[in-house]
Image: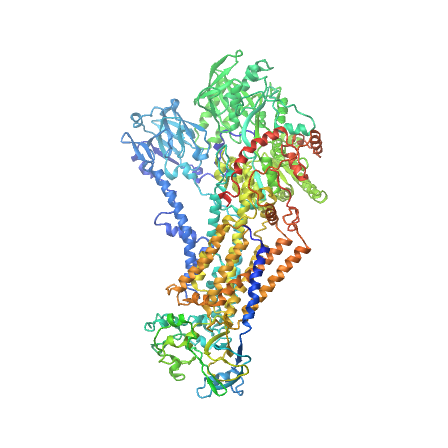
Amino acid sequence: MAAWRPSHRGRHRLDHYRAPEPDLLLGGHRTIFCNEFEKNQGFKFKGNSISTTKYNVLTFLPKGLFEQFRRVANLYFLMISILSATPVSPVNPITNVVPLTLVLSVSLIKEAFEDWKRFINDKAINGTAVEVLRDDRWKKLPWRRLRVGDIVKVNQDSFFPADLLFLASTNQDGICYVETANLDGETNLKIRKALERTWDYVDEERAKDFRGEIQCEQPNNSLYTFTGNLVIGKQTLPVTPNQLLLRGCSLRNTEYIVGVVVFTGHETKVMMNAMNVPSKRSTLERRLDKLILILFSVLFTMCLVGAICSGIFINRKYWYLGLTSDVEDQFNPGNRFLVASLAFLTFVTLFSPIIPISLYVSIEMIKFIQVTQFINKDLRMYHKDTKTPALARTSNLNEELGQVEYIFSDKTGTLTRNLMEFFKCSIGGVMYGTGVTEIEKGAARRNGTSMEEVESSKDFHEKYFNFEDDKLMKGAWRQEGSPELCKEFFRCLAICHTVLPEGDELPDKITYQAASPDEAALVTAAKMFGFFFFRRSPTTIKVRESHIEKIGRIQDVEYEILNVLEFNSTRKRQSVICRYPNGRLVLYCKGADSVIYERLNDRGNTFKDVNRDHLEYFGSAGLRTLCLAYRDLDINLYESWNEKFVQAKSALRDREKKLDEVAELIERDLVLLGCTAIEDKLQEGVPACIETLAKAGIKIWVLTGDKLETAINIAYACSLINNGMKQFIINSDTKEIREVEDRGDPIETAQMIERIVSKKLHDSLQQALDSERTQMGLELALIIDGRCLMHALDPQLRGTLLKLSMLCKAVVCCRVSPLQKAQVTSLIKDGAKKITLSIGDGANDVSMIQAAHIGVGISGMEGMQAVMASDFAIAQFRFLTELLLVHGRLSYIRISKVVCYFFYKNLMFTLTQFWFNLYTGFSGQRFYDDWYQSLYNVVFTALPVIIVGIFDKDVSIANARKYPQLYKAGIENAFFKWRILIVWALSAVYQSIILFYFPAKAIMEGKNGSGRMLGLWDAGTMAFTCVVVTVNVRLLMACNFVTKWHLISIFGSILAWFIFAFLYSGIRNQLDRQGNVYKVIFIIMGTWYFWLLIVLVPICSLALDFCYEGLQRWFAPCDYQIIQEVEKREGSPVDGFLLVESPRLSAEEQTSIALAQLPREMSRHTGYSFDSPCFDSFFASQEGVSMSHRSYDIARRASMRGPRRLSSDAGQDSPLYL
Amino acid sequence: MRPSPLLSMWGGTNISLSLGFFLPLLLVQVVEIVDEYQTACIPSSYTNNDERVQYIQDVNTNKLCTRTLTVPKHMKQPIFVYYQLENYYQNHRRYVKSRSDKQLLNGDSTSSTDTETCKPEQFLGELPIIPCGLIAWSLFNDTYSFTSGGHAITINKKGISWKSDREHKFGSFYPQNFPNNLPNNQNGSLIGGASLDPNVSLNENEDLIVWMRTAALPTFRKLYGRIDQNLNAHTQLSVQISNNYNTYSFDGKKKLVLSTTSWLGGKNDFLGVAYITVGSFCIFLALAFFLLHWKHPRPLGDTKYSLSRGHKVGKPVAN
């Protein structure tokens, strides 16, 4: 059953998204001789020291530089630098070498620093001491000295130094407990059990005599598989993952263990897994590449124009140029084509600053700060209960967060808490449990019938257990119709699981270590029913049973566990074969209704149909169901089966598959016991968050493995779907399909489904298009299940599905496999070219997380697989609001601004040189000194833009949350679309004209008091001063928000130019190649027009921008500008608790509104729909009316208040958001 | 802190206005006489440029030419004498770099590496040229002398170059092997512009220093000298021009300019016009915005108002 979280999900976890290594497929194997190093020498096994560094001292420069020059911009500048060393260059090579060197050194220092940290880390790890058997004694050696075949002793709480074959432990029965948190983040302990044959080798006296030969698979990256044999003497023993202790895990609850090293260093499974996931690039960055391409073409055009004109211009009539017959090629009028070609190269070097070399490194720095200072430190995204802060695992995608249009969400653990509570059950066709889920309450209220609120009489609430029914509690089940079935039911709960008990063996002290919370809930339920599971050994389970013989009698019963047939996603069930103390052999099985019903025996399951009704009812109430069944086994039957089982278990190849096949043989003829229903509570704030995101223009899709009913109900609960919506349901679980299915022909079934899906899709699309035309504002929802989706994703239907889903406001896909989740994500990502975000918490979401533009993992609760694959990790779904609407939006605005600004300032700067060259006979003469040009990008205009990239903020954070609609600008890409860039480009052209002509013209006629004339370099220096001032002031103008840092950096940059100018032209230096600008600054500053120009030129060049901004603001204000005006009028709100209180409505009004919201169309499943706590407030806010919150709602809100108030302390004016 | 565009516009307006209004007032006093003489100073029988070039390059022709200028208004001393060249690319890349600042400063170090940049005017035969390079070689060589009512007006040629150039860029040493000093076309070297007096050190030759501060645009003025006496209105100035410099081959204009000066400088039309234009534009804008606000008032911060995409910003979320 899909609602059941697999207990050993780990088994198949990695295989979902990683192909096994070729080695594994080829099946070569290695042989290891334990404790005999000499024999192993021939195999050349790798040592145990690891190195995760990218570089070493020798390779750092070549390799690091190689990495850097893989960036086109860097490579381009390298080529330009080389070109500028040739005579065609108008500029000194220094002009291009300096910025390149600076950019490269920043990047290299960063690389070196990161690598150094890795090196230190490696060194520490390699130097960790471990006890190894050398010369027949335990000897402390560093990990790096470990060899394959060594026998090691690992003490409690220390890490395994390599992949070990578990030989012996101080615990009885050769077991030990390991924690795998480093591998998969699961903190529950796992049991490993040594082979019985090796239990004795626990002290050095015995261990030194251990000789054996291990034949096992070649090193591979599959964490959960291991096949091999241990040959001791003439005995061959099969070895399973159960005997393998992986490097990276740690030993718990065991004094020490002894093991043989199997895989070392980089061959260990954990290291083989440490692959580099290819990093994602943001859409904005990809668009940036296009921009760079455009800049290249502008550059090319400019160079071409310059080159052609240069070829035309050159003429011997300009006798003063000395164009004699032996003039060099680049000025030889005799060969104009050659002149033009060489001039082209000249112009390329001259205009090279048009490509913003420091852009990438600046963006990297900005993003790094955004991540480390803002996202990772946001108190609003800190989950107090689990003490989990938000974590950005990559800094590449910050601005992508501001443009998300589609969110794909997993249900369990993402929308819901993944806190399972045993809520109801059905035993032998009788339903137990008086509790009413919120979903049911909502449904009842909508139908006008009131539900009596049963006040909880319990003062103590057991975790995982929210069941109330006196008919079952305290032994009352004995009085029920079928007490035997009840007993079996409870025993099944207490025995059939893989939970580990921890702590004191008392009902209120014990804690259960379970891989999935469902299991913990089931075992807790058994405890509450009087079947207290308190001790597990590898072969037995001890249960303290009460009220068996008579009420109040308690006895400990030990069940011998013979086999565990584990859960996996194909089996969807788990079985345990146990032997009662009296010798009775029973197989207990629990699993999905579909698989259990297939395997029931024909007789004796009289309540099958009643149970199915109950299952449907539970499903519609949003509960997760699980069927329980058992089978009494005949000893002969069992023995013969067990032989096959052992065979399968020791198979070296396809072990998993063989085990599945063998399990199939015994899991049949089952007797149905009943079913359990577990409630999975919605996470705090989910409906509000979804509502906010919807307002921000984001479409949310729920992709879940749950049943249709559960999925729809959850969608209702989190206000994704409401009854005002028209729903298209495409479902494979219909009568006609089932009929075809019963005939048992899979091909026919597939064709049938395909026909139906195709018809339904086309019909729905037609209807959707119709309603689009006729009914304005009718919202659509699509609900589709996995089997139909499989067909809908076929190439010929894909387009229809895409069109339909684009029209829908909400889409719910249920019963989908991890692969389908990824396919759906790709459908939108590639088909609709929209920016997608996937959010999930489990291993089944990994593929989806990796497929989307942005992957978000829910951290803190379960395994770390999703988090490890994600780009961002947050603790709660509701933090998405903060992540997208605040951080994403700001990051997008900032990065867009930074890129636009870079584009503008480089284009403008280069254009001034271009205009100048129109007046130099297209000779490629430079207008500015080499050093001005080289420091322009990296010094005089570098810092302010980074400050803006870090601090700029259009509206206050509080208003960004209050008006989610502001986010739409990001979806529409309003800040980085071509129109914006064109405006910047036009402004750059205009300003460059002003900035060239004004200084040049001004000095043409001008004189100073002494009548002396100014020359080329005076004009250049003057123009450059104006450029620096203008460009920096332009940035100030572009700021939405000015702090002292802005002012310091902007005026600091201008000051830096002046300081540089004084030093550079004040001192006769070697850097100034020809003494061109020597003393220039003093001369021009002694003239009045320098001062006049420095005022006039920036004003004149920025006047156009002023006008544009003013008119745009007045006639076509952007949303954010309106909010800015609101802030101006009302003052920036202090970020605080922004709950808008709503007036209360009377009970009649509530009912009437509830009635008004009855579904317009009733379909088969909507009958189970309900309205969620926030369902009506969603409508209310649409209509402008507010309604009171119901009692439970208030309770819920009260519970939400705590953390919010906490976060309100971190207001916008805290250092986080300066 | 949030800069409001309207407010900034006001600021800009005020600055521009104040400067734009009072600047032209100062410039009114400046008097300027411009005389274009390159055609007038060639006998009219030389009709096309080729013939004019021949005339100019012929050693034997008499290149003296007299022009009469009338002073339009009273000109207060000092009166600056400029020559203005047009279509002359002193900023051509080949030209700009054809000099050796090292050689100009330390004349002794005439090693070929120091004069590498001077090509093609690096050596005269085997001997290094001082000062080398195209710029020095093409030194302007028209000369002017002024008489008024029979009295010669002295032209003061001291102090026409920047002090920092004289002191820090040109050394105290003498021209050597300068090709222009040779008789015409001897050794096959082309004669460029002026010859240099071998007895005047480089840092004293202010004409050279002025010439070597290359101009930014192909139309440029260079200071020729200073007249340290007042000229009354309607004074007839007779200028004797020695028309030696070849601008005919590339159709360049030559102009003689006399100009007085103000505290700001010369008659700088450009800056004044620019100030007035920008200032008036800002006034216009300010008025326009006022009118706009008056005619089409837009309630600030009205969240219902958004033309950009035709959707309402909407109500705040209630949480």
- The single residue placed furthest to the top in the displayed view is A550
Q: Quadrant of residue B95?
A: bottom left
The front one of A762 and A345 is: A345
Q: Position of residue A232 (x, y in %)?
A: 35, 27
Residue furthest left as drawn: A135
Q: Is residue A391 above or below residue A1096?
A: above
Asked if one can make out residue A759 in the rendered structure from this viewpoint, the answer is no
Quarter where residue B5 is shown: bottom right
Between residue A710 and residue A933, name the one nearer to us. A933
Give the color scheme: rainbow, by chain, secondary structure or one colour.
Answer: rainbow
Residue A230 spot, x, y in % from top left:
37, 29
Is residue A17 visible to the viewer in this orientation of the structure? Answer: yes
> Residue drawn 60% across and 15% down?
A480
Residue drawn at x 56%, y 73% is: B28
Above or below for A678 versus B2: above
Horizontal placement of A174 versus A508: left or right?
left
Q: What x and y, as percent, mark residue A310?
A: 50, 70
Left or right placement of residue A194 versus residue B274 in this view: left
Q: Is residue A1067 above or below residue A52?
A: below
* Number of numbered discs overlaid on the protein picture: 0
Q: Position of residue A202 (x, y in %)?
A: 33, 25
Q: Nearer the viewer, residue B269 or A906?
A: B269
Q: Which quarter of the rendering shows the N terminus of chain A?
A: top right
